[in-house]
Image: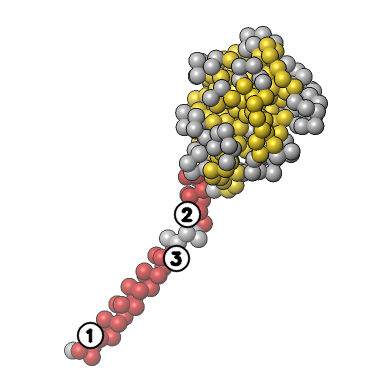
Amino acid sequence: MKKLLLPALLLAASALLLLTLTNSCNNGDTGEGDTDTSTNALAPKTLNFSVVKAYNHDTSSFTEGLLFYKGELFESTGMRGKSRIMKTDLATGKIIQHKDLDSNYFGEGIVILNDTIYQLTYQEKIGFMYSAKDFKKIGEFKFSSEEGWGMTTDGKQIIASDGTSTLYFYEPGTFRLLRTQVITEGGNLSFNINELEYVDGYIYANQWQSPYILKIDPATGYVVAKADLSSITNQVKSNFPYAAELNGIAYNPTTKNLYVTGKYWPEMYEIKLTP
């Protein structure tokens, strides 16, 4: 009986081992079906939007930064010899106050924290600080990235982009680099991250030379949702051929809506995002 039982037991064990190995291969990370499932799980959700209102926008503004601070609208512009920071009237689009940047510098994004305006420059690796009240220059700072693009704040840190897939988190005042965060979309590196706005725990970003607004989780770096503003950008460029790319995104806590515009655009749009 023992001689007959042993081969049977060995045969059963071999079959069980083969079944286990087969299942392991089918459930491995290299399986095509599983990769697709994982990628789909990481794909950003679609953000829909509706246009609430259109406002006048200065067509000479090569917009690099846009934000509301204490109920007032601020904007920064680029191009050497034409870069400035300014406060504008939302209703009319007229400039209320401005400060020109030295013609040696190409101005980029701005952020305001604790009544201080921080302004990046494009490739000069230097930034400037001004009083938000009278635009008086109060300091300078250097930053870690090779280029300066957009900025925003979560109220504690200053968050900046450089046109790549990386965001930089700085200490206000000193501009000491605290950390970096790589941004991914659907499991792949994101790209061309530009003007930024922090809203309710998320970073919203213009994607340079595209009609997209990305909604980013700053803790993980994942693009969790995405809005396609092609209908706005196509309409603007159709009616105003000199208009350049979408750039400029501001959140107004009073209306709880976003305001978007672009470089040399004649209008700024108040939009309401919906899941």
Neighbour tally class for label 1: few under 14, some 14-19, many 20 plus, Cα within 10 Å: few
Please identify the quarter of the rendering in which residue 208 is found: top right
Total residue callouts: 3
Q: Nearer the viewer, residue 97 or 62?
A: 97
Q: Residues within 10 Å of mark 3 (few under 14, many from 20)?
A: few
* Residue located beneath label 2 in the image: 34
Q: Is residue 123 above or below residue 264?
A: below
Disc number for residue 203? none
Q: Is residue 261 visible?
A: no
Residue 237 point in image, percent of width and height = 74, 23
Sequence-first disc among 1 and 3: 1
As drawn, which residue projects farthest toward the front? 138
**Element marked by disc 1:** helix
**Is 142 or 50 nearer to us in this picture?**
142
Q: Secondary structure at mark 3?
A: helix
Q: Amino acid at mark 1?
A: Leu
Residue positioned 49% across, 25% down in the render: 274
Please identify, in this view, whether the residue under mark 1 or under mark 2 is nearer the observer: 2
**As rendered, which of 157 and 33 lies closer to the eye?**
157
Q: Earlier in the sequence, mark 1 or mark 2?
A: 1
Query: Can you give x and y, in whole percent of width and height, for residue 223 in the image?
Result: 53, 39
The residue positioned farthest toward the left in the image shown: 1
Res 25 label? 3
- Disc 1 and disc 3 in contact, CB within 8 angstroms: no
Q: Does residue 18 appear left or right of residue 194 in this picture?
A: left
Is residue 20 found left or right of 216 in the rendered image?
left
Residue that numbered label 1 is attached to: 5
The answer to which image quadrant residue 73 occupies is top right
In the rendering, at what x and y percent does residue 86 appear?
68, 18
Q: Earlier in the sequence, mark 3 or mark 2?
A: 3
